[in-house]
Image: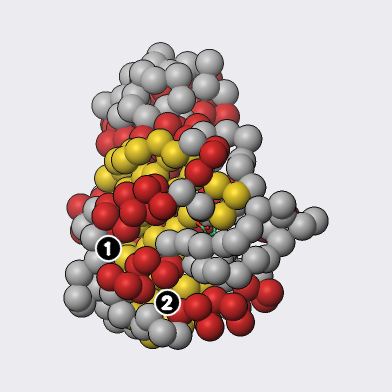
Amino acid sequence: MTSPYSPSAAGFTAPAKKQLGQHFLADRSYIDKIVLAVNPKDDDRLVEIGPGQGAITLPLLRRHPRLTVIEFDRDLIAPLTAAAAPLGELTIVHRDVLQVDFTELADGGQIRLVGNLPYNISSPILFHAMEHAAVIRDMHFMLQKEVVDRMAAEPGSKVYGRLSVMLQAWCRVTSLFVVPPGAFRPPPKVDSAVVRLVPRDPATVGILDRKRFADVVRAAFGQRRKTLRNALNNVVSAAQFEAAGVRSDARAEQLEVAQFIALANVPHLDGDDVPQG
Ligand code: SAM
């Protein structure tokens, strides 16, 4: 399908591919706000996910002479290369971002991730990044506003859920600003927002077993209207609730992230009625 919008930020016209979540940023004021929020410094190693037609890439390259981008759409590679050539050193990784090993890419250092993400795979990208949080200094992502609200939500909020807990366990999450549909070509149906995630020092996160933590959080919010005792009846025993100091008559949406971590960290106790694998 061909987009009716032209020209693109990179000065070339390419059809927008819906299946790749292509909504190109076209409003200069929001592009400037993103670059300002990232505020690249000389030694930074910037990695952009989904550069598209270069709306953020080219202004970033003007501020910072080296940039790595990860783009899945073959049709965008040549025009992006040409548009970037006079500005700086652009390394293009032509792959699905979910297949990119950020730890390998970081090569012993730390990277800063930036991206107006393809909304259809934004959660998988976030979870993928969490796997590599130790090599990521920070992330600035544009996402659906509704997703950003869930990411940054606090206990007690209606939108506090699995995404909030899984991300906040590893990162400090700050919603920065809202971007309306009219800032994109073609416009998405919903508002967007830019969010900053800053991974915590891995030594302070305190999760003993990632899989166990993920299982507990998933089960707790799988039936969020139930008490934790009921929602977790195959996952956490009464003795484990007690050992973690967590009330089993609470609901998942009332628990702080640290309490989920405490609950998941309690070892299997003698006499437990709950099998753990
Ligand atoms: N950064 C550009 C902008 O702001 O105008 C484009 C943003 S657009 C919302 C998302 C970009 O991610 C598109 O360029 C799309 O081709 C790319 N993309 C989609 N799926 C991808 C994947 N699995 N891996 C890497 N890039 C992907």
Q: Amino acid at mark 2?
A: Thr
On the question of residue 20 being in view, the answer is: yes
Q: Is mark 2 within 8 Å of ligand 1?
A: no
Q: Amino acid at mark 1?
A: Arg
Q: Which one is in front, 44 or 275?
A: 44
Q: Quadrant of residue 78?
A: bottom right
Q: Assess whether mark 2 and mark 1 are in contact (beta carbons under 8 angstroms).
A: no
Q: Residue at x 55, y 47 (%)?
A: 184
Q: Residue at x 53, y 83 (%)?
A: 82
Picture quarter with ligand 1: bottom right
Q: Residue at x 53, y 16 (%)?
A: 225
Q: Earlier in the sequence, mark 1 or mark 2?
A: 2
| Element type at mark 1 | strand
On the question of residue 162 being in view, the answer is: no
Number of numbered tags placed on the structure image? 2
Which residue matches tag 2? Answer: 68
Q: Which circle marks residue 137 in the picture?
A: 1
Q: Position of residue 103 (x, y in %)?
A: 39, 74
Q: Residue at x 68, y 74 (%)?
A: 75
Q: Quadrant of the N terminus?
A: bottom right
| Element type at mark 2 | strand
Q: Position of residue 275 (x, y in %)?
A: 53, 40
Q: Nearer the viewer, mark 1 or mark 2?
A: 2
Q: How is the image coloured?
A: secondary structure
Is residue 129 shown left or right of residue 111? right
Q: Is residue 8 above or below residue 83?
A: above
